[in-house]
Every structure is written in C-alpha cells, then in structure tokens.
Amino acid sequence: MYSFIASPFPSHYILNSSNKRSSNPKCISSKSSFSVKPAIVSCVSNASSSNSDSVKLLSSESTAKLIPNGIQVEGVVTTGFGRGSKTLGVPTANLDHERSEITSLISSSFGHGVYCGWARVIIDENSDALWYPSVINYGMNPTFGDIEIPLVEAHVMNDFEGDFYSRRIQLCLVAFLRQEMKFNSFQELIKNIKNDIKVATAVLANQNKPTTP
Ligand code: ADP
Ligand code: RBF
Ligand code: MG
C-alpha cells in the first residue's frame, strides 16, 4: 500500500516505504527466453495499413520498471499550447514549473521518459478526490522541440467534463515505461502514446492505489 507522509517540501509528498509488493521491485516480470520455429508466410502488400504497421511500439508490460516506493508529486494544472488534445487527441494536464524539486525528484530516478501511475484532481478541497490510472510524460517533448524546461504532464484515464486548469493535481508514479523519444511523425508519437496507455492499464491492474489521509 502507498501512503503519504509529509515531505520537507510543501509542494509534494513522498511515499513511505511500507509498500510490500515484490521481491524484485525494479522489474515487473522477466519472461524466459524461447525459440520460435521459422514459419513460411506469404506476404501480401497492403498499402493502406503498411504505414501504421511499421510503427515500432516502444513500451511493453514486460519491460516496465517498477519504482520502489513510487514518486509522489503535486502541482497546479497550467495551460500549454493545447496540442495534447488538438494535435494528438490525448489531453495532458501540465504541472506548473515553479517548483524545481518536483522535477529533481523524478530526475533522481529514471529521468526523462514515460511513466504510469495514479492521478487525482482536487476539484473541491472539502471532498475526497478519486485516484485514476494515468500515463505521465516527463521531458522536453522532443518531437516538437519548442519547450525550454522539462515538463511534467499527465493524461488521466477518466472522462472529465470540461477542463480543470488551476486545480491541484497529485500524481503517484508507479513504473517507468520507456524513454521519451523524438519521433519522425505525429502518427508514430500518437501510436506510441496509445500503446503506453494500454501498457499502463495492464501494469496498474496489479498495483495498489495510494492510500490517502
Ligand atoms: P495544454 O497544452 O494546455 O496542457 P492539452 O490539450 O494538453 O492542453 O489539454 C489539457 C487540459 O485538458 C488539462 O489541463 C485539463 O484541464 C483538460 N483535461 C480534460 N480531460 C483530461 C484528461 N483525461 N487528462 C488530462 N487532462 C484533461
Ligand atoms: N513527446 C515526445 O516528443 N516524445 C515522446 O516519446 C512522448 N511520449 C509521450 C507519452 C505519453 C504517454 C504522453 C501522455 C505524452 C508523450 N509525449 C511525448 C508528450 C507530447 O509531446 C505532449 O503531451 C504534447 O506535445 C502536448 O504537450
Ligand atoms: Mg498538456
């Protein structure tokens, strides 16, 4: 179980170490190697699908790396270029950049890359917010190359009505999925993000939500 302890920093929380999940916490599963007999296949060219079929998917459940005790960060949702929803079809809540300790916490583990974890948006300070599965990107969006400091952004797997700019958002990063990459096309980036979402769903199915005070 994750539980919160107050951190020396006012803007985030660090998880305590009562999380007993796996004897090999860095690695979720290690599949044994196997051999496959070569098969004779007939190859039919299919112009409409060849492009998307050639996109390499970079994350998988078997290569995801659990983060011992998780990383807990918190921030206020700020506005960006709006391209998560408009260009990629995947909105991401951007955390404010003022607090460098947020990014230094992540940098001290796996650094720039794609993570999965839990997210909750504090819409009403007086009532409990629910934790939802989430994919989190931490980095420079190299496919676009137009930001100057690393961004923490989370796509929350829940259908929200409207936006939640200026609200507080809390994230608990549970596993590292892959490096952040510069893709040659938006199509490749979108396919990989969709795959990351699938991988995150599978990884988080075996993980506990944070316990909250
Ligand atoms: P921006 O560049 O301003 O971050 P995005 O296109 O990435 O714009 O959209 C992000 C905004 O969409 C979030 O700040 C939030 O207010 C809203 N939003 C709605 N649903 C979600 C969701 N499921 N996950 C993340 N953000 C969402
Ligand atoms: N941007 C990249 O340039 N390269 C990536 O590999 C990359 N991976 C992402 C994975 C996920 C799951 C998400 C949610 C975002 C990712 N992004 C990546 C960030 C993306 O460029 C960004 O969300 C949009 O530009 C909107 O800010
Ligand atoms: Mg965004």
Image (tube, rainbow, N blue to C red):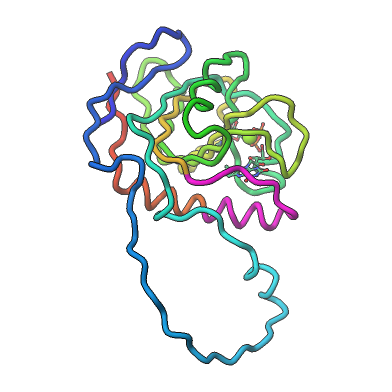
Figure quadrant of residue 1: top left
Nearer to me, 45 or 80:
45
Q: Residue at x 34, y 60 (%)?
A: 31
Figure quadrant of residue 86: top right
- x, y (%) of residue 89? 64, 49
In the rendered image, residue 179 lying in the magenta stretch gets the answer yes
131 sits left or right of 95 in the view: left
172 sits left or right of 145 in the view: left
How many marks are shown on the rendered structure?
0
Ligand 1, image quadrant it occupies: top right
Q: Residue at x 44, y 29 (%)?
A: 171
- x, y (%) of residue 97? 62, 19
Up the image or down, 170 lies above or below 176; here it is: above
- x, y (%) of residue 85? 65, 43
Figure quadrant of residue 192: bottom right
- x, y (%) of residue 140? 67, 34
Up the image or down, 49 lies above or below 114; here it is: below
17 sits left or right of 35 in the view: left
Q: Where, quadrant-wise, is the C terminus in this rendering? A: top left
Residue positioned most to the right: 146
Q: Residue at x 48, y 88 (%)?
A: 39
In the rendered image, residue 180 lying in the magenta stretch gets the answer yes
Which contiguous range is marked in magenta? 177-195
Q: Residue at x 37, y 27 (%)?
A: 129
